[in-house]
């Protein structure tokens, strides 16, 4: 269970995701293999690891798949204190910029 909640994210997971970002026109950091990841990138990689197809070496867990009929949805767990701090900082920054 801990592997599912905190999967290892070696560069073999980071590199394909950043390649996909590049192909989609998203900004990509020049150092592809540099870790640690930002919290947003880590959440995105974990979600991708959980929900992408097993053919790609991922778990393939999806609420739409018949073999996962007990799964209602897949979402990242949140740190409520971090969220409060982040939202407060974001609000103050946007109000000050008006």
Image: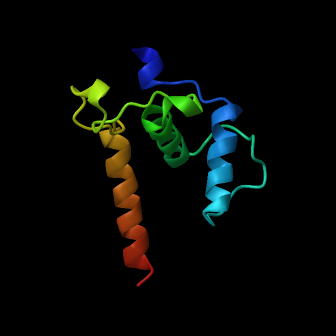
**Protein image colouring:** rainbow
| Residue situated in front as seen by the camera: 50 or 69 | 69
Residue drawn at (66%, 50%), measured in percent from left and top? 18
Q: Quadrant of residue 25?
A: bottom right
| Residue situated in front as seen by the camera: 31 or 57 | 57
- In the rendered view of the protein, which quadrant contains the C terminus? bottom left
Left-right relation of 18 to 4: right
Provide residue 69's location: percent of width, then percent of height: 23, 28
Q: Quadrant of residue 47?
A: top left
Residue drawn at (50%, 48%), measured in percent from left and top? 40
Q: Quadrant of residue 15?
A: top right
84 shown above or below 24 = above
| Residue situated in front as seen by the camera: 80 or 65 | 65
| Residue situated in front as seen by the camera: 47 or 66 | 66
Give the number of callouts. 0
Provide residue 20's location: percent of width, then percent of height: 63, 53
23 shown above or below 53 = below
Q: Residue furthest right?
A: 31
Residue drawn at (67%, 59%), measured in percent from left and top? 22
80 shown above or below 60 = below
- In the rendered view of the protein, which quadrant contains the N terminus? top left
Provide residue 87's location: percent of width, then percent of height: 35, 57
Provide residue 77's location: percent of width, then percent of height: 34, 35
Left-right relation of 33 to 62: right
Q: Residue furthest top?
A: 1
């Amino acid at each position: 269970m801990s592997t599912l909640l905190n999967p290892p994210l070696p560069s073999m997971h980071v590199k394909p995701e950043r390649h996909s970002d590049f192909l989609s026109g998203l900004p990509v950091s020049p150092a592809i293999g540099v870790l640690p990841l930002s919290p947003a990138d880590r959440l995105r990689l974990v979600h991708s690891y959980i929900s992408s197809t097993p053919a790609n070496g991922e778990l393939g867990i999806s609420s739409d798949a018949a073999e996962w009929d007990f799964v209602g949805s897949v979402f990242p767990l949140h740190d409520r204190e971090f969220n409060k701090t982040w939202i407060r900082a974001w609000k103050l920054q946007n109000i000050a910029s008006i």
